[in-house]
Image (cartoon, rainbow, N blue to C red):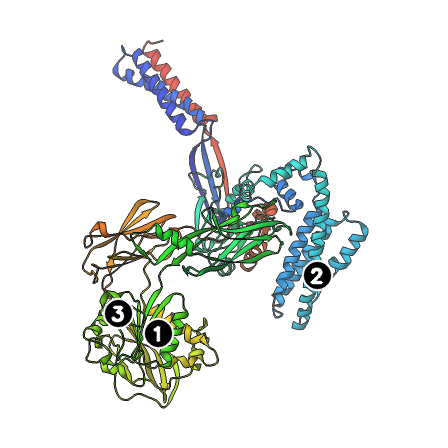
């Protein structure tokens, strides 16, 4: 069935825009009507109205001719295929390509009409390009399974075709000896390989090996022909006033996106984009970050080509999300294809190759057009900075700067890390041209922190954001200086988190826990052991080794590790202090049971509500086989001893089982996380639950130190560090007398939301019944107010999230009627900036990725100089075409007849009225 649809629209194509013509026509028509009206004042009323109107309409039609009115007819015959054209809108498309080989440069210039076709013979570079295609096909052969007989045949045939194309281009160009060598080493073996049956798997394996070897030969000849052509052209272009030299200089100054714009929107009677619109239902889109933004789509109202493409400004290249979303609703009854114009430097989102496989399943091939030089230009850049997110302020910052070194060897340069203008670390280096290299850095930050603390006298700071600048000194010949700067942001932890370790005796578990936390720079341990002094019980007060017997002293701790302490070690009210520390202060407590079963003694004390278990029966010593994680703990960070889940489960099963476990039964609302297998049944040995504002973790055995056998700190230290960080409340960034405030990360990305956390107190106990607002300042200007919600399980804790954040420097302050405004000093800081993607780090064309995208989807890869092949490659997809034509009204009788008719009617009426 041949479906036809015709759409007709009125357009204006004259020297004036339509609105100017209409405005002038209205003004002159009105003037003519008013002047004419004065002349007809003695006539009958109908003539006084009709005669001026006829003259005014004639004037309007004559003036409108200046705007060039036409009727545009768009006839669609048959069904058009869908065609999505995606233009890479990332900043790497702003780069120029002076390093591109001369053959490719001249091919592009000829394609753009800047160099005449007959000015330079292009046989050598075109042969080199054909051999490069052959080499790429041979590379695909390395991954081809020997069972793929049909794919092998196609690959061998295509390889031979590319080599044959090169041989035809070289006929009459090469010397006889080189031509004979090329035929002997490559052309004849390629033909023989394509004709080989290779029906068995072992025969195909040998054939694939031969193909790979021929691919190496194709690479060698491609390089030889390219270098030979470049040498000759370089000599010719070096002459003073050489047109060829001028054209090459112009190419070197044209960024990739301008060459793409010229290729799509200019050239010939019908530019390339117009040719696509004649055979396809076209949408032109730009890939802007992870989104695809519409640039142009022909409609019945307007199919005029766009004047140009927007200047690329994206900080990331995502070649997957846009094409995937565009084709998600594609109907299989309509043919469709995708074309991606890009340099292939994908650095964000899912794999475009995997997306191309999905699109192939939907019957949507992806054609890719590569822009840029596959030769890496001379460039020295900061590719990545690896450093910890947080460092204790008395420690040193240790990390690595990954450099991209594509410079000639032997050029000196300096890598510097600066705080403002002050260097805090630097190293003298020499280029080696080895692409990627790592440079380690190590410097103290205590002085940097002290300077910043002096500027914050009204609040207690536990984490200071520090931003440093990483820079590479200028090197002669560096093609891109904008990638020589980067930033290093981290949080300097100014206060160690505090642990109070209580035990009734110096058992092995307590000793190892004290030692491991003392070695950890994030923690400060106060170990209080009954009987550690000559006096009975333990000392009390603020000194190390003393029990903090006041609420204010105990509130300075973050975690209590509570061992087998006898009840009579405490005085009246001290157990209530511990209960309040957990329930009201939001502290954490870890109970570690033991064979003396001291924890049972607290069942009738103020600590009783904290325990997540009850004890039934006697302790278990026999039949303990191994430890097993339950389903809940498998996905929890504290119980992750290896990154692989299967390996992690095996490690837990291989840990030495306890010698004794308490007969604990979890209470309602408590979670069992770790079990011990005892005579084939499971017994809970690690139980967790929330209590008021804090958290409680119960351990039913006290010999986890035995996990150190043969592996040392590997599992024991990791486990208890992870448990402590999990149960203890995350430290707040800043504090004053009444507010503890934290805004989450030091750095967010545009579009992220910051997690706000506030703990409010009246100076002694939590404030729970209050309205709390977080005030957000962006670059010093109040930007938003966020109402925080109370956390039902944590007294005095309020939480909230900001809306999507824009780039800038932020501060967060608190407002609440429960606390006088003059007392609210705490302010937390963070920054919102784009993620470092390395957008301007890799400057060359990633041809391999673009080839893969096209290959797996059933499309075709083209270089930018081959852009003219696209209409022919896409033509089989479409079952229809668009025919456009114009009726030029202002040059036709359709326009002149009304003018003549109006003036004639006016003349007749004037004569009859006696006005002639």
Quarter occupied by residue 771:
bottom left
Mark 3 burial class by Cα count in 10 Å: few <14, some 14-19, many 20+: few
Task: Tell me which residue sits at (37%, 85%) in the image.
Answer: 677
Answer with mark 3 or mark 1, whichever residue precedes in sequence: 3
CA distance separating discs 3 and 1: 40 Å
Q: Where's residue 665, x and y in %?
A: 27, 82
Label 2 sits on residue: 214
Q: Secondary structure at mark 2?
A: helix
Residue 878 seen in render: no
Q: Is residue 596 visible?
A: yes
Q: Residue furthest bottom?
A: 622
In the foreground, 194 or 11: 194
Q: Residue 858, relative to residue 540: is it above or below? A: above
Residue at 40% from the left image edge and 73% from the top image edge: 516
Q: Is 816 left or right of 37, judged from the image as shown?
A: left
As drawn, 500 above or below 815: below
| Mark 1 nearby-residue class (10 Å; few <14, some 14–19, many ≥20) | few
**Residue 551 location in percent, x, y?**
23, 67
At label 2, counting other C-alpha atoms closer than 10 Å, the crowd grade (few under 14, some 14-19, many 20 or more) is many
Front residue of 632/8: it is 632
For the point 67% across and 73% down, which residue is it? Answer: 202
Separation of residues labelled 2 and 3 (CA atoms): 83 Å
- The x, y position of residue 565, in whole percent, is 28, 79
205 in relation to 757, above or below: below
Q: Which residue is mark 3?
A: 541
Disc number lying in front (3 or 1): 3
What numbered label is drawn on residue 686? none
Looking at this view, name the residue that lies furthest to the right: 177
The kind of secondary structure element at disc 1 is helix
Relative side of 375 to 715, left or right: right
Instruction: Pick whichever of labels 2 and 1 is earlier in the sequence.
Output: 2
Q: Which residue is mark 1?
A: 632
């Amino acid at each position: 069935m041949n479906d036809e649809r015709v759409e007709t629209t009125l357009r204006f194509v004259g020297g004036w825009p339509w609105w100017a013509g209409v405005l002038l026509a209205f003004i002159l028509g009105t003037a003519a009507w008013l002047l004419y009206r004065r002349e007809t004042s003695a006539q009958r009323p109908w003539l006084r109205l009709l005669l001026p109107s006829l003259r005014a309409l004639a004037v309007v039609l004559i003036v409108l001719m200046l705007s060039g009115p036409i009727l545009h007819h768009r006839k669609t015959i048959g069904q058009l295929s869908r065609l999505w054209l995606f233009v890479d809108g990332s900043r790497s498309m702003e780069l120029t390509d002076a390093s591109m080989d001369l053959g490719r440069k001249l091919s592009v210039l000829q394609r753009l009409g800047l160099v005449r076709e007959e000015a330079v013979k292009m046989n050598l570079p075109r042969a080199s390009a054909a051999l490069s295609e052959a080499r790429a096909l041979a590379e695909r052969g390395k991954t081809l399974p020997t069972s793929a007989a049909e794919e092998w045949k196609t690959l061998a045939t295509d390889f031979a075709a590319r080599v044959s194309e090169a041989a035809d281009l070289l006929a009459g160009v090469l010397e006889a000896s080189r031509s004979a060598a090329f035929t002997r080493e490559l052309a004849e073996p390629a033909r023989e390989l394509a004709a080989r049956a290779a029906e068995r798997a072992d025969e195909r394996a040998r054939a694939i090996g031969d193909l790979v070897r021929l691919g190496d030969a194709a690479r060698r000849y491609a390089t030889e022909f390219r270098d030979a052509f470049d040498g000759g052209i370089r000599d010719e272009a070096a002459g003073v006033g050489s047109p060829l030299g001028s054209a090459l200089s112009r190419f070197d100054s044209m960024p990739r996106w301008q060459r793409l714009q010229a290729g799509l929107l200019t050239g010939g009677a019908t530019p390339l984009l117009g040719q696509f619109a004649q055979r396809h239902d076209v949408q032109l889109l730009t890939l802007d970050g992870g989104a695809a933004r519409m640039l142009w789509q022909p409609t019945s109202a307007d199919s005029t080509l766009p004047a140009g493409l927007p200047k690329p400004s994206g900080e990331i290249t995502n070649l997957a999300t846009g094409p995937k979303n565009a084709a998600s609703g594609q109907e299989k009854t309509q043919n469709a294809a995708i074309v991606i114009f890009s340099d292939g430097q994908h650095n964000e989102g899912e794999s475009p190759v995997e997306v191309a496989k999905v699109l192939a399943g939907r019957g949507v091939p992806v054609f890719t057009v590569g822009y840029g030089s596959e030769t890496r230009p001379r460039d020295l850049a900061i590719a990545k900075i690896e450093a910890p997110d947080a460092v204790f302020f008395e420690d040193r910052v240790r990390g690595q700067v990954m450099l991209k070194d594509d410079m000639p060897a032997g050029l000196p340069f300096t890598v510097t890390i600066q705080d403002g203008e002050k260097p805090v670390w630097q190293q003298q280096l020499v280029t080696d041209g080895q692409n990627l290299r790592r440079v380690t850095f190590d410097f103290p930050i205590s002085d940097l922190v002290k300077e910043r603390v002096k500027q914050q006298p009204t609040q207690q700071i536990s984490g200071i954001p520090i931003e440093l600048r990483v820079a590479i000194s200028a090197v002669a010949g560096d093609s891109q200086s904008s990638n020589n700067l980067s930033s290093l942001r981290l949080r300097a932890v100014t206060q160690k988190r505090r642990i109070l370790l209580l035990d009734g005796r110096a058992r092995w578990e307590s000793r190892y826990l004290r030692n491991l936390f003392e070695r950890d720079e994030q923690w400060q341990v106060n170990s209080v052991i009954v009987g550690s002094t000559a006096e009975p019980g333990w000392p009390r007060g603020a000194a190390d080794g003393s029990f903090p017997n006041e609420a204010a002293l105990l509130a300075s701790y973050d975690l209590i590790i509570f061992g087998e302490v006898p009840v009579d070690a405490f005085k009246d009210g001290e157990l209530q202090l511990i209960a309040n520390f957990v329930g009201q202060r939001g502290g954490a407590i870890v109970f570690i049971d033991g064979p003396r079963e001291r924890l049972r003694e607290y069942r009738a004390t103020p600590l009783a509500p904290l325990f997540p278990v009850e004890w039934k029966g006697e302790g278990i010593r026999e039949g303990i086989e191994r430890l097993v994680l339950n389903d809940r703990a498998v996905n929890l960070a504290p119980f992750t001893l290896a990154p692989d889940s299967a390996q992690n489960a095996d490690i837990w099963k291989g840990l030495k089982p306890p010698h004794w476990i308490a007969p604990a039964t979890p209470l309602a609302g408590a979670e069992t996380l770790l079990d011990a297998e005892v005579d084939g049944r499971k017994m809970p040995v690690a139980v967790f639950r929330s209590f008021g504002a804090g958290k409680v973790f119960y351990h039913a055995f006290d010999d986890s130190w035995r996990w150190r056998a043969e592996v040392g700190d590997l599992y024991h230290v990791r486990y208890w560090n992870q448990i402590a960080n999990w149960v203890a409340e995350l430290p707040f960034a800043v504090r004053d007398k009444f507010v503890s405030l934290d805004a989450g990360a030091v750095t967010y990305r545009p579009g992220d939301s910051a997690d706000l956390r506030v703990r409010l107190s009246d100076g002694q106990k939590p404030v729970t019944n209050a309205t709390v607002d977080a005030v957000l300042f962006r670059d010093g200007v109040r930007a938003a107010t966020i109402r925080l919600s109370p956390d039902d399980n944590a007294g005095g804790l309020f939480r909230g999230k900001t809306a999507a954040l824009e780039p800038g420097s932020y501060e967060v302050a608190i407002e609440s009627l429960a606390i006088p405004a003059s007392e609210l000093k705490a302010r937390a800081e963070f920054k919102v900036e784009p993620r470092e993607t390395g957008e301007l780090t890799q400057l060359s064309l990633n041809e391999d990725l673009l080839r893969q995208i096209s290959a797996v989807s059933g499309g075709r890869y083209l270089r930018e100089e081959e852009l003219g092949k696209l209409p022919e490659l896409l033509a089989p997809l479409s079952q229809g075409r668009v025919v456009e034509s114009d009726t030029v009204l202002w040059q036709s009788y359709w326009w002149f007849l009304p003018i003549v008719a109006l003036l004639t009617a006016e003349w007749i009426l004037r004569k009859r009225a006696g006005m002639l």
